[in-house]
Image (cartoon, helix red, strand yellow):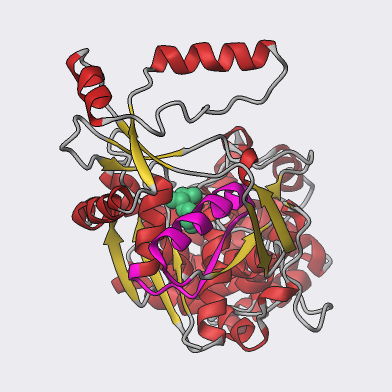
């Protein structure tokens, strides 16, 4: 069987984590079976669709490494096809024009509610004569096109994730609106269910893998496939993603767009790894770290759980840190640059690449998110640092000032130090001033960084030294001690 799957977002918002996770499953499924992954932009809702959201979707998928083999197809460019389909349904008697007004529909719903019934259209215009249609149009009414759904129809399919699913025609809300028209001659503007079925048939989609919020749509769509005598794809409905409180992850959780995760300092490999685990369990259930490429080997849709997946921030953080710690410094550097620039640090990648790579290698093991690098590298990008209280009291300790002074003088004579020279200098100072090495190191840390904690001092000092920043800092510290 040729596997052809699609991700079909509506560009009514930025690429959402739920859509991205569904894209991960589709992508893995396609790659596992040597199939095709298609991007289709469902922009028939012109009022809510925006080109910048299409851009966000494309950028988000690309950033995640979910490259598509075909598309993007735009539904807004395929209206003829849908209108042709509407015509087919009308000609075959599977669809009809309905002139019920919004007001009449409201009344109907109210009366159903009063009787404790679920709201549904009562199919009142199923059998209008051409004369009745014309009379309604003379009143200024505009038709919608409805597809007939018989109450006694039972719709059954075997869902790859949820098993056998059964729907009753009577539970689908009455005859379904598939297009909105302006007159009897008009074939109208197609709505979601129609456009999806026409496209999935036209694009020979073999498997529809999408969120479980679409289950009721699937029941309706199966009826449309039957009416068109098209091949019905196989279906897999992926579970919801819940927040830590167990509610559906939504805009209220602040981070729902993939771009938010980027801004928070997550790396794409960690995101796709984590998203794959939001519902899927690898055959080796202890395996928590895998690249998308690795997961393609073992990914099967039947290992996706039907129960909702809870979003677990500590786990995402842990996965992110693992990718950061194992990343080559040059790649990590490229990823850090935008965050530094955003913090206002001056970064000169062409001149300073080597130095920046060393800075990166030094801090990498202590990063969880890329954004952590901003604070951790402040010491390298600022000319001076502010001394915190602990640093000041360290520098005010007896015997410290002469040590700092001595280092400063030494640097004035010989500004650049090798690691051996720096080590030797510390050794000499310990001897000359008759103090413990710890005191020298702590005092240097206080003067160079303004803090008492941080990365390996020798490495840090040598990096500052390469930029001549250590002299500044020592001079500054001396001034502080004296004042
Ligand atoms: N446009 C739909 C959505 O954004 C996609 C549904 C589908 O995959 O069929 O939810």
Residue 344 painted magenta: no
Q: Describe residue 446's horizontal placement relative to residue 16 as left or right.
A: right
Residue 376: quadrant of the picture: bottom right
Residue 6: quadrant of the picture: bottom left
Residue 215 painted magenta: yes
Residue 456 in view of the camera? no
Identity of the residue drawn at 44% across and 54% down: 340
Q: Nearer the viewer, residue 205 or 231?
A: 231
- Expressed as whole percent of the image width and height from the top left, the position of residue 402 reads 67, 55
Identity of the residue drawn at 63% across and 37% down: 253
Q: Describe residue 139's horizontal placement relative to residue 378 as left or right.
A: left
Segment colored magenta: 202-231
Prevalent SS, magenta region: helix
Q: Quadrant of the C terminus?
A: top right
Identity of the residue drawn at 29% across and 73% down: 350
Residue 181: quadrant of the picture: top left
Q: Nearer the viewer, residue 39 or 234?
A: 234
- Expressed as whole percent of the image width and height from the top left, the position of residue 326 reads 63, 79
Q: Nearer the viewer, residue 57 or 168?
A: 168
Residue 149 in view of the camera? yes
- Check the image and report above or below for 97 versus 259: above
- Expressed as whole percent of the image width and height from the top left, the position of residue 109 reads 56, 17
């Amino acid at each position: 069987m040729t596997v052809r799957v699609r991700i079909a977002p509506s560009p009514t918002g930025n690429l959402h984590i739920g859509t991205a996770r569904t894209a991960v499953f589709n992508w893995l499924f396609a790659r596992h079976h040597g199939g095709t992954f298609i991007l289709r932009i469902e922009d028939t809702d012109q009022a809510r669709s925006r080109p910048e959201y299409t851009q966000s979707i494309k950028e988000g998928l690309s950033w995640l490494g979910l490259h598509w083999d075909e598309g993007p197809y735009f539904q807004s460019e395929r209206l003829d096809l849908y209108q042709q389909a509407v015509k087919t349904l009308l000609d075959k008697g599977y669809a009809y024009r309905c002139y019920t007004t919004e007001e009449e529909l409201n009344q109907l719903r109210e009366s159903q509610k009063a009787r404790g019934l679920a709201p549904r259209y009562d199919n009142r215009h199923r059998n209008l004569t051409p004369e009745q249609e014309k009379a309604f149009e003379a009143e200024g009414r505009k038709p919608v096109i409805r597809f007939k759904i018989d109450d006694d129809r039972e719709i059954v399919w075997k869902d790859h994730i949820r098993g056998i699913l059964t729907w009753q025609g009577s539970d689908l809300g009455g005859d379904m609106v598939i297009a909105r028209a302006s007159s009897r001659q008009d074939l109208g503007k197609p709505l979601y269910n129609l456009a999806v079925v026409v496209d999935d048939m036209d694009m020979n989609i073999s498997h529809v893998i999408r969120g479980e919020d679409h289950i009721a749509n699937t029941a309706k769509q199966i009826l449309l496939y039957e009416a068109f005598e098209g091949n019905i794809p196989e279906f897999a409905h992926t579970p919801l993603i819940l927040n830590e409180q167990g509610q559906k992850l939504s805009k209220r959780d602040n981070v729902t767009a993939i771009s938010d995760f980027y801004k928070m300092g997550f790396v794409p490999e960690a995101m796709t790894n984590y998203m794959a685990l939001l519902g899927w369990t690898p055959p080796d259930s202890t395996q928590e770290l895998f690249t998308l490429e690795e997961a393609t080997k073992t990914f099967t849709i039947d290992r996706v759980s039907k129960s909702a997946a809870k979003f677990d921030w500590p786990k995402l953080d842990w996965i992110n840190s693992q990718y950061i710690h194992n990343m080559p410094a040059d790649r990590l550097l490229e990823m850090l640059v935008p965050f530094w620039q955003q913090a206002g640090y001056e970064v000169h990648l062409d001149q300073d690449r080597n130095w920046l790579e060393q800075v990166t290698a030094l801090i990498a093991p202590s990063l969880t998110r890329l954004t952590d690098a901003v604070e951790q590298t402040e010491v390298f990008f600022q000319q001076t640092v502010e001394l915190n209280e602990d640093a000041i009291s360290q520098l005010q300790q007896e015997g410290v000032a002469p040590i700092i002074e001595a280092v400063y003088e030494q640097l004035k004579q010989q500004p650049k130090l090798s690691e051996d020279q720096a080590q030797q200098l510390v050794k000499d100072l310990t001897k000359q001033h008759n103090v413990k090495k710890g005191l020298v190191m702590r005092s240097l840390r206080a003067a160079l960084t303004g803090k008492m904690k941080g990365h390996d001092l020798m490495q840090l000092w040598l990096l500052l030294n390469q930029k001549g920043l250590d002299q500044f800092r020592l001079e500054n510290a001396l001034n502080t001690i004296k004042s």
